[in-house]
Amino acid sequence: MATAGPNVSPSRAIIRISVTTVALLSSAGLLAGELSAQTVSTEGRIAFVRPGDVPSDHCFGQPCSDIWVMDVDGSNKVNVTNTPDVNEDQPAWSPNGARVSYTSDGDEVGGFTDIWVMNGDGFNQVNLTPTGANGNNVHEYQPTWAPSGTQIAFVREIPGEVISEQADIFVMDVDSGTSDATNVTGTDASEIDPAWSPDGTKIAFAGVRNSGFEIVTMDPDGKNELILTGDGFDGDDRAPDWSPDSTKVVFIKQSQIGGCCEPWEIWAVNGDGTGNTNLTNHPSDDMGPSWSPDGTEISFTSNRDATQDEPFRTDIYVLAAPSTLPPPAGLAVMTTSESGVRRLTRDGGSTSSEWADVPLDTVRPKVRRTSPAAEGTGILSTTNVTATFSEGMRAGSINGLTFKLFRAGSTTKIAATVSYNTDTRRARVDPANPLRSGATYRAVVTTGAKDVAGNGLDQNETLSGNQQKVWFFTVAG
């Protein structure tokens, strides 16, 4: 069974998750079995993929895909890549939540893709596998981090003995990239969708075994394979993700018993191959599961809200996770109710959710530079007032309530327009009228200004509580 290159720049960018020849419409699901007592996780953040707003020739006249992050309740969505002419896909959080690895075609021609890494706010983007620069164009995709944060497993397509291009799983050091990448599968079959277990002892993947894609685990060096699912042609199993205690694997299955193509459903299995359980029962395609760090929920993408006019509509949802597999007798009852599902997006184009184990960061932002400078004199009356932050900020938190200008000694705010540039991390106040000659003004950025992780501004962390940024300047007489 051959696999195609990662479908990162198709005309319908929302049909991507497993990057195979099958058009995967991402995951959703309805809960079943014994559910965890806690049904709403508050830990971590979720990275996901959404098409941009502007069509691009690079993406066949459709908007290219960007990587976004949001809170676990679906709020505070931030585009952290925002590249109109480049595709980014398949985000994977580093274990400490500080960085994201992903797939991008930014440096390649002909649709080839590489493994990249960036900070959680989208800065410091680095290509770890720039194979095209060496004249060796290959597809590399689907990164997953080792819990140490020093290695990444990924898929590379190489010349095959049975098929022209086969997918194998490689492991590389993050610092040295492909210079030391090791092929840890190396079979004549295809292996895709790697997922490193949180305890570091296993890598789960989807591999062609028994004449069909099965969920398989192996040691990080490729030894000691164990097939967790074994239905051959009767089912197509993909996209594994580990529970945080490394005892269970959630994955997606498409039944082949009635022929192609039945809906994709979310299943789960114990790490020893027992307890194979269907968690969903819905006529939509439910795919791309990702376990919450506290083990109580599973995020996924679904086309359950697609319409006749928008047949490829997808959004991200969350369902309660099973605590045991199989569930105790009497509790393994499928439901077609929506009561156990939380919906996180409503744009109709979101896919590929990835739950971070920890918040993006806990470092509170500061104002690093101001214009005019503090205590500046001789300032033009037509000047704009700017503040540049130490890290990326939530654009929605930069407004007339959090960035204000006053005449010194006055509590009346100067009428002005406030804006924020995500690329430069700079906020600007444009006064509606020229400033008064010879007057001194007070600029204030309040603690309501927040970074992308939700941390409020704290200009002086040595004092108790968050401190706002205040500075004065004087206009030329």
Image (cartoon, rainbow, N blue to C red):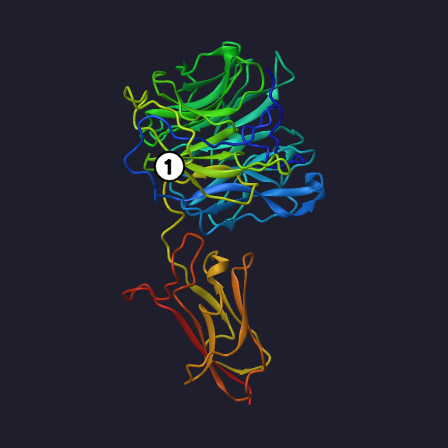
Residue 364 higher or lower than 1, as above or below: below
Relative to residue 70, is residue 374 depicted above or below?
A: below
Q: Residue, x 33% and y 64% (percent of image)?
A: 466
Quadrant for the C terminus in the image: bottom right
| Image point (46%, 22%), residue name | 205
- Pointer 1: what residue? 292
Figure quadrant of the N terminus: top right
Dot 1 amino acid type: Ser
Q: Residue at x 38, y 42 (%)?
A: 96
Q: Residues within 10 Å of mark 1 (few under 14, many from 20)?
A: many
Front-most of residues 207 and 229: 229
Q: Position of residue 110 (x, y in %)?
A: 70, 33
The spot of residue 439 in percent (x, y) is 50, 87
Number of numbered discs overlaid on the protein picture: 1
Q: Quadrant of residue 431?
A: bottom right
310 vs 275: above or below: below
Q: Quadrant of residue 229?
A: top left
Q: Is residue 23 visible?
A: yes
Location of residue 389 in the rendering, given as x and y in whole percent from the top left corner: 47, 62
Q: Secondary structure at mark 1?
A: loop
Q: Residue furthest front?
A: 337
Please state which of residues 437 and 61 is positioned toward the viewer in this rendering.
61
Q: Residue visible at 68% across and 40% down?
A: 59
Where residue 242 sits: x, y (%)?
38, 28
Q: Quadrant of residue 457?
A: bottom left
Q: Is residue 123 visible?
A: no
